[in-house]
């Protein structure tokens, strides 16, 4: 049984996502940013090859979604200094701040009971 007006709370979270994360069009976009952000937070940013090896999606889809996210300013690509063939992907500081506010929105919405 759904209690505690869960759908009203989910609407609040969804409104935040629509306003601040509208460039995330697919679940693959969400999954890619989750993995990129997680590894960045852990101090070991991913290369595009490592991202592919996580098996989130096919190579063509990965390339297409990363291009979309880069054009939206949601990911940064940088050639590795030790191996110029490898491209590291990270989240810009602006997006990390948005995700921090997203976390606070979720916490405030679901911890108010």
Image (cartoon, rainbow, N blue to C red):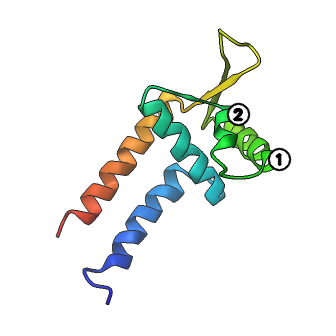
What residue is pinned by disc 1? 60
Residue 55 position, x and y percent, is 67, 50
What residue is pinned by disc 2? 49
Residue at 60% x, 38% y is 74
Residue at 49% x, 27% y is 44
Where residue 42 sits, quadrant-wise, is top left
Residue 101 position, x and y percent, is 36, 45
Ranked by sequence position, the earlier of labels 2 and 1 is: 2
Badge count? 2
Task: State whether residue 26 is above or below residue 32.
Answer: below
Judge by depth and name the residue closer to the eye, 14 or 43: 43
Could you tell me if residue 22 is visible in this image? no
Q: Residue furthest front?
A: 53
Would you call the spot at circle 1 few (<14 residues within 10 Å), some (14-19), or many (20 or more)? Answer: few
Residue at 62% x, 59% y is 27
Residue 43 position, x and y percent, is 44, 26
Mark 2–mark 1 distance (CA, rounded to whole Å): 13 Å
Could you tell me if residue 56 is visible in this image? yes
Horizontal relation, residue 61 to residue 94: left or right? right
Judge by depth and name the residue closer to the eye, 110 or 90: 90
Residue 99 position, x and y percent, is 43, 44
Would you call the spot at circle 2 few (<14 residues within 10 Å), some (14-19), or many (20 or more)? Answer: few
Which image quarter is the N terminus in? Answer: bottom left
């Amino acid at each position: 049984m759904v209690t505690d007006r869960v759908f009203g709370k989910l609407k609040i979270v969804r409104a935040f996502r629509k306003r601040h994360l509208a460039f995330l069009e697919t679940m693959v976009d969400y999954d890619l940013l989750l993995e990129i952000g997680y590894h960045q937070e852990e101090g070991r940013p991913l290369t595009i090859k490592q991202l592919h090896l996580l098996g989130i999606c096919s190579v063509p889809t990965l390339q297409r979604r990363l291009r979309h996210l880069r054009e939206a300013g949601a990911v940064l690509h940088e050639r590795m200094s030790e191996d110029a063939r490898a491209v590291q992907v990270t989240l810009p500081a602006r997006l990390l701040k948005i995700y921090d506010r997203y976390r606070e929105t979720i916490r405030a919405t679901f911890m108010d009971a």
